[in-house]
């Protein structure tokens, strides 16, 4: 088994219990096609949302829109070096300084505060970058646990036009600088 530094990107964001490890396009490709990306995972491997997010990284790379720092990060638990999920950006920030973030945890890692801890750290990192003013998260209206995660991480649900997509059944949350 390889160590995280041998298979991932160059960015690492430490938290109290986790290390967020950026992934390179080759790792994203492996994850998106059913592999483990070289990580040892809690349970049976990455959740579906992690695979979808990794696929988004591959798509951005293939069209020449990959920015290494605005990628997906695998959430590696410090105590045992097991991956518990992934969190990342849907793209680089737009001209208005907005960037969207998404995340997914393996089922066995849910309910332990890992998503909130990682979301606080990755959002703080994003807001510290030049030109970034807002981090957004789109959450399914039926996904109360995820709504709780973004709220605990300091996000607020937006109001007014664009704040919820009635057809999609989603809420938009944001965290501003």
Image (spheres, rainbow, N blue to C red):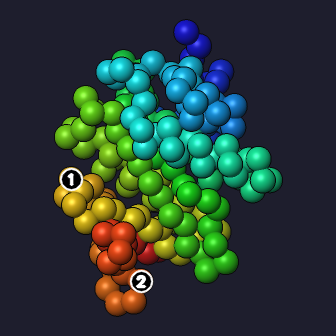
> Percent from the top left, x then y, of residue 111?
19, 40
Residue that carries the numbered disc 1 in the rendered image? 145
User: Which residue is nearer to you in this view: 60 or 100?
Assistant: 60
Question: Mark 1 or 2 closer to N-term?
Answer: 1
Residue 144's place in the image compared with 110, above or below, is below
> Percent from the top left, x then y, of residue 82?
40, 22
The image quadrant of residue 157 is bottom left
User: Which residue is nearer to you in this view: 131 or 102?
Assistant: 102
Residue 62's place in the image compared with 175, above or below, is above
Residue located farthest toward the bottom when viewing the structure as drawn: 160
Residue that carries the numbered disc 2 in the rendered image? 162
Residue located farthest toward the top when viewing the structure as drawn: 1
User: Which residue is nearer to you in this view: 14 or 105?
Assistant: 105
Residue at image x 63%, y 46%?
Answer: 57
> Percent from the top left, x then y, of residue 123?
45, 59
| 114 horizontally vs 132: left or right | left
> Percent from the top left, x then y, of residue 165?
37, 76
Neighbours of disc 2 within 10 Å: few (<14), some (14-19), many (20+): few
User: Which residue is nearer to you in this view: 138 or 129?
Assistant: 138
Residue at image x 59%, y 43%?
Answer: 55
What is the secondary structure assignment of the residue under circle 1?
A: helix
| 58 horizontally vs 82: left or right | right
| 170 horizontally vs 123: left or right | left
Q: Residue 63 carries which label?
A: none
Q: Do the residues labelled 1 and 2 touch (CB within 8 Å)?
A: no
Residue located farthest toward the right when viewing the structure as drawn: 64
Whether residue 14 is visible to the viewer of this picture, yes or no, is: no
Neighbours of disc 1 within 10 Å: few (<14), some (14-19), many (20+): few
The image quadrant of residue 91 is bottom right
For marks 1 and 2, give the one nearer the viewer: 2
Which quadrant: the N terminus?
top right
Residue at image x 70%, y 52%?
Answer: 60
């Amino acid at each position: 088994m390889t160590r995280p530094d041998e298979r991932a990107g160059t960015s690492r964001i430490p938290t109290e219990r986790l290390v967020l490890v950026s992934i390179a396009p080759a790792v994203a490709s492996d994850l998106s096609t059913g592999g483990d990306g070289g990580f040892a995972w809690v349970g049976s491997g990455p959740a579906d949302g992690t695979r979808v997010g990794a696929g988004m990284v591959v798509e951005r790379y293939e069209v020449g829109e990959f920015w290494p720092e605005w990628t997906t990060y695998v959430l590696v638990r410090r105590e045992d070096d097991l991956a518990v999920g992934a969190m990342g950006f849907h793209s680089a920030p737009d001209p208005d300084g907005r960037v969207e973030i998404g995340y997914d945890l393996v089922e066995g890692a849910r309910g332990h505060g890992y998503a909130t801890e990682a979301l606080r750290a990755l959002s703080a990192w994003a807001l510290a970058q030049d030109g970034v003013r807002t981090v957004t998260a789109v959450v399914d209206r039926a996904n109360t646990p995820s709504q709780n995660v973004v709220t605990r991480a300091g996000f607020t649900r937006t109001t007014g036009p664009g704040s919820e997509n009635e057809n999609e059944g989603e809420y938009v949350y944001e965290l501003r600088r």
